[in-house]
Image (cartoon, helix red, strand yellow):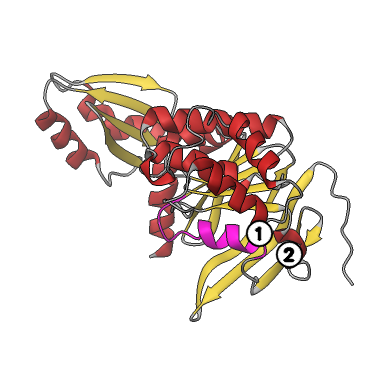
Amino acid sequence: MSVQRDTGDIVIDVRGLTKKFDGRAVVRDLSMQVKRGSIYGFLGPNGSGKTTTIRMLCGLLTPDGGTGTCLGYDIRADADRIKRHVGYMTQRFSLYEDLSVRENLEFVARVYGLDNPALAAEAAIGRLGFRDREDQIAGELSGGWKQRLALAACTLPNPRLLLLDEPTAGVDPKARREFWNDIHALAAEGLTVLVSTHYMDEAERCHEIAYIAFGELLAHGTVAELIAGSRLTTYVVSAPSSRELNRLLEELAGKPGIAMVAPFGASVHVCGREADALEAAIAPYRQRRGLDWRRTAPSLEDVFIELMSRAQGDSR
């Protein structure tokens, strides 16, 4: 019989996680730690292994390789125990659209076997701001309020770990911000949150983030640590016309010394891993009429685009 181990401030601690489907490795040798009460963000392109990793951590999938614990339980031997303490929210709304907010919450509370479903629903309604919407039919809610209702439902049994799989995809910016305010409030109460997202502004609201591509963990840490660790030198270049910017982008792409060149709105970001090599590469273009070159700190998006381009090169 497996015994829960006291992991102190570490809620998730895994080493060498690997998962294959039809002989193809979807997750390769992934190791990570997540601290109690933290918001840990997973970023990466579609098919990078984020969802597979989350499902292995919460006991829904058995790893083909690797070891570790989640909430002090062994991820292989204690999958059923882990599930009892985890709230899992998928991207797709999965509650009953023909029931009201309160009816959905009371139903879910009964499914979880809570002693007083009505009281539990009432507490969730107050906690997540449904006072004026508790009798509204779920199918009539906006996308943002639907996701908020799903969040209320998966936190009903007071889980110790919350797993969110791209919870705000397709939700408007205001609703996304309000949703994240709720997440931070829950984390402040001690709930640990693991969330996958495509949005850079959401990644920056996480305490720590990890970037996964082609099944491998490429980088992890705080936003400041990832930016500093990238060692990128970055220039923002603006021009009087998009035609000039496109021309510059085409000419610089792939040049030695340039790790990344990408359009950002009305400008182009040019990055290099070695400052001297970058300066040599862009020197012929610095005096081109109409181009304004401004050195700046790399953004998180610069770092991830550069990581992705490097990963694509390695995969080839």
> Magenta residues, as a range?
44-59
Quick check: can you spot residue 195? no
Secondary structure of the residue carrying numbered label 1: helix
Circle 2 sits on which residue?
Answer: 75
First of labels 1, 2 by sequence position: 1
Mark 2 neighbour density, 10 Å: few (under 14) some (14–19) many (20 or more): many
Circle 1 sits on which residue?
Answer: 57
Say if mark 1 contacts mark 2, CB within 8 Å.
Answer: yes
Residue 51 covered by magenta stretch: yes
Name the residue at 42% across, 61% down.
Answer: 47
Query: What amino acid is labelled 2 in the image?
Result: Ile
12 on left or right of 51: right
* Quarter the C terminus occupies: bottom left
Mark 1 neighbour density, 10 Å: few (under 14) some (14–19) many (20 or more): many
139 on left or right of 266: right
Which quadrant holds residue 35? top right
87 on left or right of 96: right
Query: What amino acid is labelled 1 in the image?
Result: Leu
Name the residue at 74% across, 59% down.
Answer: 82
* Quarter the N terminus occupies: bottom right
- Percent coordinates x, y for residue 162 in the rendering: 64, 47
Residue 215 lies, with reference to residue 43, above or below; the image says below
- Percent coordinates x, y for residue 256 in the rendering: 32, 44
Observer-nearest of 265 and 169:
169
Secondary structure of the residue carrying numbered label 2: loop
Residue 1 lies, with reference to residue 253, above or below; the image says below
Quick check: can you spot residue 108? yes
Name the residue at 17% across, 22% down.
Answer: 239
Residue 89 lies, with reference to residue 61, above or below; the image says above
284 on left or right of 228: left
Tell me the distance, in whole angstroms, between the alpha carbons under discs 1 and 2: 7 Å
